Structures are given as structure tokens and as C-alpha cells.
Image (spheres, rainbow, N blue to C red):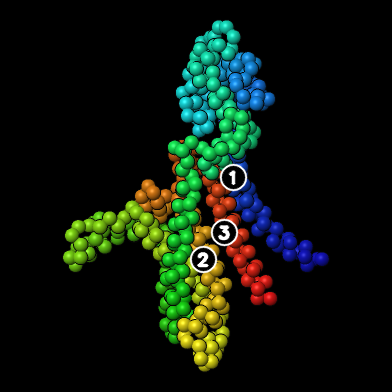
Amino acid sequence: MTRRWMAAALVAPLLLFLLAVFVLPIGAFLLRGVEERDVAPVLPRSTAALAAWNGAGLPDEAAFAALIEDLREARARDQESGAGSIARASARLNADWPGFRSLLPMTARRVAAGTEGPAREALIGISEDWGTPIPWAAIRRAGGPYSDFNLLAVLDLKRDAAGAIGAAPEQERIFRAILWRTLWIGALATLICLALGYPLAWLIATAPPRLAPLLLGGVLLPFWTSLIVRTAAWTVLLQREGVVNAALAALRLTEGPLPLLYNRGAVLLAMVHILLPFMVLPIYASLKALDWRLPRAALSLGASPLRAFLRVSLPLSLPGVGAGCLLVFIQALGFYVTPALLGGANDQMVPYFVAFYASRTVNWGMAAALSLLLLAAVALVVALYGRLVGFGKVRTA
């Protein structure tokens, strides 16, 4: 028991460090994908009044009156402190229903100037949009403290005024295509790395002792160079006036510069260059641990070299193949710099849009929801790999 406590005490600082600088910050960021922070503080009475509304027809007079009071107070507070709370609430609501970015500030200005008569008539007189249930449903959905709006949005889904989940309008359906594109590019990069990496790993594993370290060093060489530097080098090589086009023109193989940059091929080329070592090393380790007497025994018993490879060497090296494919595919899903520098508009992956929402539009909710989507894809891949490995163990036993 004393040894266990001592071991726990030795590991505890590392665990606390990981918890403080890794788990908690990432968890706090991912939580932003389901949090609602922008609307309820600005429209507290309105969100409370709409909580019991069923989404059918218009809300009652109390909701209209609550919205007027909330907007008057929020505008006075923004004018006094310059906080811009109405602008933030408008931006969040505009993501749900386009038109709120102008509707809410305009309504706030008009109600601050004074309204006459019943609240319903006053708001509908300001804008006919308040006479439809759509903006009211958007306010209710953003009332918080948590909602699935961003999570549904990254799946191209949306709730209607009654709360039912359905497909988003066709012009807003982009994220499923982006997810499939990300998975497809990751799968292509993995297959190319496997096709190139397995023969290279075989060559290193069977090379003479003097040559093997040199070949292995050549594989490890990209690790010593920054990813951005390697990507920038491909830009220099593939651009219209780059080295490749200049060489082709000098050899008179082309009549003009080829479009080698800003396309899917350039992205895959650079990704394979960066990820190939992660495929070679696990396969090399698996082949290095292989008992080479087994394929030689298969050859001595009459098997052809191809049959001995397919029935003996390849199955015994599959753990390295699986580990390499898993490493390459998971890393490929998270590529941002390479597609951004070498790809076109149709080659950008999920990480690009995470950065777009986090830095350009400052929409942390969508950035966190897209990160959750990518995390779920990675978890699914790892789970599938675990099941396949598990089946293999059961079958072997």
C-alpha cells in the first residue's frame, strides 16, 4: 500500500499539470459550443416570458411588453458604458435568423424614443417581422443557459418555431460537405502514405546494417524541419514560376506553366510528405520484430514469394500497419496550415473553419461546435480501430 501511495504521489504533479493546462482549458472551450451567453443578459424578461410559449402563433402581450422594457434598458446601458450588448445579441440571433443584425438595434432605437399604445401594436408598427413567430422563436432558443443550436448547425440541422429538428435551408447546408471532404482528404493521404510507406519500411527493415541507419535517418529528416517551412517550400516548388514549372519548361515538356498550386493535388502532396514518417516508423518497428525464419520456412515449403508475403509477412505486420494508419489519419484530420497555404477554396478542411469562426468572426460557439464535431470523428475512428483490434484478438485466441 505504501508503494502505491508513493507511486501516486510521483504521478500526481504530472496529472495536475495536464489537468490545469490541457484538460480544463480545452473543456472550457468546448463548453462554449453549447453555452448561451449573449442574449439572456440583454433580454432577461423576454426570454423568461417566452419560456412557456409553445411556438404556435404569436406570444402573448406580456412577451411584447417584456421585449420593449429589455431593449430600453439595454440601449440606455450601452449608451452609458459603451458595452455593445445589443450588437452581440444581434450577432448571435442573426446566426439563427438572418435579419436580426439590423432588426434588433433598429427596434431598440425606436422603443428608446418612446412608444404608444399596446406593446404588440407598437412592435409590429416598428417592423412587420415582429408579427411573425420566427424572430420570437430565435429569441427563445437563445435564452440559455445551454442550447444545441451550434451543434445542430454543424450538422446542417435546425429547430423550427415549435422546437422540432429538421434540415437547415439548402443555402445554409455546408458543414456536412466540409466534414466529408475532411474525411476524404484524410483517407486519401492515409492510403498514399500506406502505399509509399510499407515498401520503404520493408526496404529499411531488410537493408544491410550499414545502410539501414542512413535510410532511417532520411525518413526522420522531416521531423527536424518546421511544418510551416516545409509547406512554404512546396509553395516555392509548385508555383507558376517555381522550380517544377521552370524545370518542365527547360526540358520542353510543357508549353506553359502548369496549375500545380492551390488544388487538391498540392495539398495531398504536402500532407504525404509531412505524414509519411508516421506511417513508416510503426511498420518498420513491426517488421523489425518479425521472425524472418517464418517467411523463409514458407518459401522452403513451396510457397511463392508473393504467397509467402500475403500469408505470413503481411498478417504479422498488420499491427504496425494499423498503428501507422491510425496516426496518419488522425493527424490528417487536423491539418490547417497546409490546405490554407496550398489548397483552393474547395480544399479547406474543418480546422480551417474552426480558425475562421474563432479569429475572423469571433463566433466562439461555432468554433467550439466544429471542434466537437472533429473530436467526435477522431473518437469514432479510434473506437473502430479498437473494435477491429479486439476482433483480431478474439479470432487469434
The amino acid marked with disc number 1 is Leu
Badge 1: residue crowd in 10 Å (few <14, some 14–19, many ≥20): many
Q: Secondary structure at mark 3?
A: helix
Looking at the picture, tell me which residue is in the foreground, 289 or 316: 316
Q: Position of residue 31 (x, y in %)?
A: 61, 42
Looking at the picture, tell me which residue is in the foreground, 219 or 102: 102
Residue pushed farthest right? Answer: 1
In the picture, measured across the screen, residue 129 lies left or right of residue 6, that is left
Establish if 353 lies above or below 125.
Answer: below
The amino acid marked with disc number 2 is Cys
In the picture, measured across the screen, residue 135 lies left or right of residue 5, that is left
Q: Please report the residue visible at 60 percent of the width from the left and 61 percent of the height from the top.
A: 384
Q: Position of residue 293 (x, y in %)?
A: 55, 88
Q: Which residue is mark 3?
A: 381
Establish if 119 lies above or below 356.
Answer: above
Looking at the picture, tell me which residue is in the foreground, 25 or 92: 92
* Image quarter hosting the C terminus: bottom right
Q: Please report the residue visible at 59 percent of the width from the left and 48 percent of the height from the top.
A: 26
Q: Which residue is mark 1?
A: 30
Badge 2: residue crowd in 10 Å (few <14, some 14–19, many ≥20): many
Q: Nearer the viewer, mark 2 or mark 1?
A: 2
The amino acid marked with disc number 3 is Val
Q: Position of residue 135 (x, y in %)?
A: 54, 25
Precedes in sequence: disc 3 or disc 2 = 2
Precedes in sequence: disc 3 or disc 1 = 1
* Image quarter hosting the N terminus: bottom right
Q: Which residue is mark 2?
A: 325
**How many angstroms separate mark 3 from mark 1 (CA)?**
20 Å
Q: Please report the residue visible at 19 percent of the width from the left and 67 percent of the height from the top.
A: 251
